[in-house]
């Protein structure tokens, strides 16, 4: 007996870890309380939508005892139509020579009447009256009788209601327009029962906003995958006019790529100046949703709110006992969503509601680093001219924007992230606009009532976007933008713009720099105030595009971002295995420490640029050569003259 007890104990101990492990293999779950046994129905929460590659859902249902239960998913119930054949109680010719056909109405709501005559030669009209609550009312006057094949028919929609009796009064003619007695073959009443429409729910997902050029980009993370999105609604600071795109993101060739799914334009001013509605009306693949708004240079401001109107399926199951039933995702059980219920005439059911969905606490951001361990190849810092430290406190999924010096470098793709002597795989994320403040040092000429501002960008670069100037008040000014002439001798007008503000408030002038010469970093702003009060700039900033990278950090500790190699190509890491999971997660933002330059010779790196193009070093070298030549000439000429005197 003791041996049997020991065996039972061993089996129980061996079975316990298995059951615990099975219970933990889920991603999201929600429970629904069923008060009585029987058929139960509930709307599936969006968090439990987990679409698989074969267009099914990864979903399971557990009963109060922890065992799996069968269930069904469907989108909506179609309308059902029941036909009732009506029989005449009275037929006669009234005082006006019209044929009256009276019958009792069915004991159900009637939406329409179908009338069939057996003589195709007959044409005419029919009037429909009904008795409801013991009062006769006219429902339809002069409904046309139309020939159809070898019969004459009329389909007459009426106000949906439950009636007591119907009177059909026929006014018939043959082809020679002689009145004829109507021969009614059949009258049918149609009772249409409206089905259950889509379950609608509005959600407000978390989102991030960035700008690059004139485009504002919103990246939202949906609560589930495979959701049916009807519309997306944005709240903006100003009226949006321009082009929009909505799509998803994928990792392709080592960088985040935008895949458009729908596009459109807004060309007219709407009464809802702060609201933009984008139609989708389709099931969405994955959890990543990206919206791009191109306002074509107009001020838009940062969108403040995003909401989505979803269509959700319903879950139907037979509750064999009262209690809590739990739906779980991530279990590997697949089921498809039916268009309509599999059994439309099923017994009456009880409607229940799911509790708030919860996520498996073991599947946090750390699960990405525990599950997907990708390491890069060996790393050497040869050829790199700068490095920046990146401090990682905990393992996780991170997004690292480039420091300004790295963003403005010509070869932004030739960077590497390393931990010691090993590369850290990453993919290029989106670029975004980053402002950097500029020093305001106005030079006011009182006699001409003009003001000049000299601005120096941190460095020449092809990645400058705009120069933004801010001022306050009501004014109108012509702004001249000048660039230095070759040789740094004076300036020449590059472009002129008109700046005006009709409100006594702050306004910003945006001067595009996308066509600024790549070797230029000095800009002069000249404003002629004419007979007006001098205009004072309150702020100035230069905006550049900054790329960023996303990566998985498997352990805390310092990483190093290396760059400055002018010829190094972009890396090619194998991130295809984890791209789906990465696209379903918003990374944590992390910043790099200030850049430190590597030791280099005096004729390398930053010194070389001063001896290129129009740099001051080139002119200094030419001046030195000229001085040497003058010294040689001065020494040679006196010697030549002295020789002539001797002769």
Image (cartoon, grey):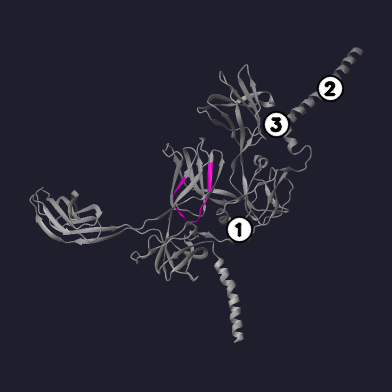
Residue 118 visible, this orientation: no
Q: The magenta stretch spans which residues? A: 216-233
- Dots 3 and 2: beta carbons under 8 Å? no
The numbered dot on residue 163 is: none
Task: Judge by depth and name the residue closer to the eye, 87 or 358.
Answer: 358
Mark-to-mark CA distance, 1 and 3? 50 Å
- Label whose residue precedes the other's in the sequence (1 or 3): 1
Residue farthest along the right direction in this orientation: 646
Residue under circle 1? 368
- Label whose residue precedes the other's in the sequence (1 or 2): 1
Residue under circle 3? 613
Q: Main secondary structure of the magenta part?
A: strand
User: Residue 378's image quarter?
Assistant: bottom right
SS of the residue under disc 3: loop
Residue farthest along the bottom direction in this orientation: 1
Residue 227 inside the magenta-drawn segment: yes
SS of the residue under disc 2: helix
Q: Is residue 42 left or right of residue 490?
A: left
User: Total marks drawn?
Assistant: 3
Q: Quadrant of the C terminus?
A: top right
Where residue 358 sits: x, y (%)?
A: 52, 59
- Dots 1 and 3: beta carbons under 8 Å? no
Task: Judge by depth and name the residue closer to the eye, 342 or 358.
Answer: 358
Residue 159 visible, this orientation: yes
Q: Is residue 63 left or right of residue 372?
A: left
User: Residue 516's image quarter?
Assistant: top right
Q: Nearer the viewer, mark 1 or mark 3?
A: 1
Q: Quadrant of the N terminus?
A: bottom right
Q: Nearer the viewer, mark 1 or mark 2?
A: 1
Q: Is residue 409 left or right of residue 89?
A: right
Where residue 537 sits: x, y (%)?
A: 60, 28
């Amino acid at each position: 007996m003791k041996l049997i007890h020991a065996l039972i104990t061993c089996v129980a101990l061996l079975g316990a870890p298995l059951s615990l492990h099975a219970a933990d293999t889920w991603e999201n779950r929600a429970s629904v309380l069923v008060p009585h046994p029987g058929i139960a129905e509930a709307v599936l929460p969006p968090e439990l939508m987990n679409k698989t590659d074969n267009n099914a859902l990864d979903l399971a249902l557990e009963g109060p005892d922890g065992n799996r239960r069968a269930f069904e998913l469907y989108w909506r119930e179609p309308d059902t139509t029941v036909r009732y054949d009506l029989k005449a109680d009275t037929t006669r010719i009234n005082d006006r020579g019209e044929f009256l056909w009276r019958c009792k109405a069915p004991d159900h709501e009637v939406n329409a009447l179908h009338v069939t005559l057996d003589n195709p030669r007959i044409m005419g009209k029919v009037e429909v009256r009904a008795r409801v609550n013991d009062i006769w009312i006219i429902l339809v006057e002069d409904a046309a009788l139309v020939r159809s094949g070898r019969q004459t028919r009329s389909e007459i929609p009426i106000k949906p209601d439950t009636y007591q009796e119907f009177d059909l009064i026929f006014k018939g003619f043959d082809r020679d327009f002689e009145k004829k007695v109507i021969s009614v073959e059949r009258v049918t009443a149609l009772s249409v029962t409206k089905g259950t429409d889509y379950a609608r729910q509005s959600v407000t997902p978390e989102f991030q906003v960035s700008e690059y050029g004139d485009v504002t980009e919103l990246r939202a993370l949906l609560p589930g995958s495979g959701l049916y999105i009807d519309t997306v609604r944005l709240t903006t600071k100003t009226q949006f006019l321009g082009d929009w795109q909505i799509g998803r993101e994928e990792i392709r060739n080592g960088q985040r790529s935008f895949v458009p799914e729908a596009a459109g334009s807004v060309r007219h001013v709407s009464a809802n100046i702060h609201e933009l509605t984008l139609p989708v009306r389709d099931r969405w693949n994955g959890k990543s949703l990206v919206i791009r708004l191109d306002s074509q240079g107009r001020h838009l401001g940062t969108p403040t709110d995003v909401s989505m109107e979803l269509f959700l399926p319903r879950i139907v199951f037979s509750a064999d006992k009262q209690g809590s039933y739990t739906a779980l995702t991530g279990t590997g059980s697949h089921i498809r969503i039916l268009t309509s219920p599999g059994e439309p005439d099923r017994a009456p059911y009880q409607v229940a509601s799911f509790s708030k969905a919860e996520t498996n606490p073991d599947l946090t951001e750390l699960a990405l680093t525990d599950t997907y361990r990708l390491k890069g190849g060996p790393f050497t810092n040869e050829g790199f001219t700068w490095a920046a430290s990146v401090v990682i406190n905990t393992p996780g999924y991170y997004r690292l924007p480039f420091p300004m010096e790295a963003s403005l470098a010509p070869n932004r793709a030739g960077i590497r992230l390393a931990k010691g002597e090993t590369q850290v795989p990453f993919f290029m994320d989106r670029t975004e606009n980053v402002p950097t403040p500029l020093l305001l040092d106005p030079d006011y000429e009182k006699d001409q009532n003009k003001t000049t501002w000299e601005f120096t960008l941190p460095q020449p670069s092809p990645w400058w976007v705009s120069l933004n100037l801010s001022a306050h008040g009501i004014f109108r000014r012509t702004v001249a933008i000048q660039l230095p002439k070759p040789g740094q001798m004076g300036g020449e007008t590059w472009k002129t713009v008109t700046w005006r503000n009709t409100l006594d408030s702050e306004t910003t002038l945006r001067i595009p720099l996308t066509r600024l010469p790549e070797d230029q970093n000095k800009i002069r702003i000249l404003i002629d105030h004419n007979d007006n009060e001098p205009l004072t700039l309150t702020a100035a900033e230069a905006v550049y595009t900054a790329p960023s990278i996303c990566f998985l950090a498997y352990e805390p500790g310092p990483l190093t971002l290396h760059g400055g190699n002018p010829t190094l190509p972009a890396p090619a890491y194998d991130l295809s295995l984890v791209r789906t999971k990465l696209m379903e997660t918003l990374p944590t933002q992390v910043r790099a420490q200030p850049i430190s330059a590597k030791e280099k010779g005096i004729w390398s790196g930053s010194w070389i640029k001063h001896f290129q193009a129009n740099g001051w070093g080139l002119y200094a070298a030419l001046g030195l050569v000229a001085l040497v030549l003058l010294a040689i000439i001065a020494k040679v000429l006196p010697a030549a003259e002295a020789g002539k005197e001797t002769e």
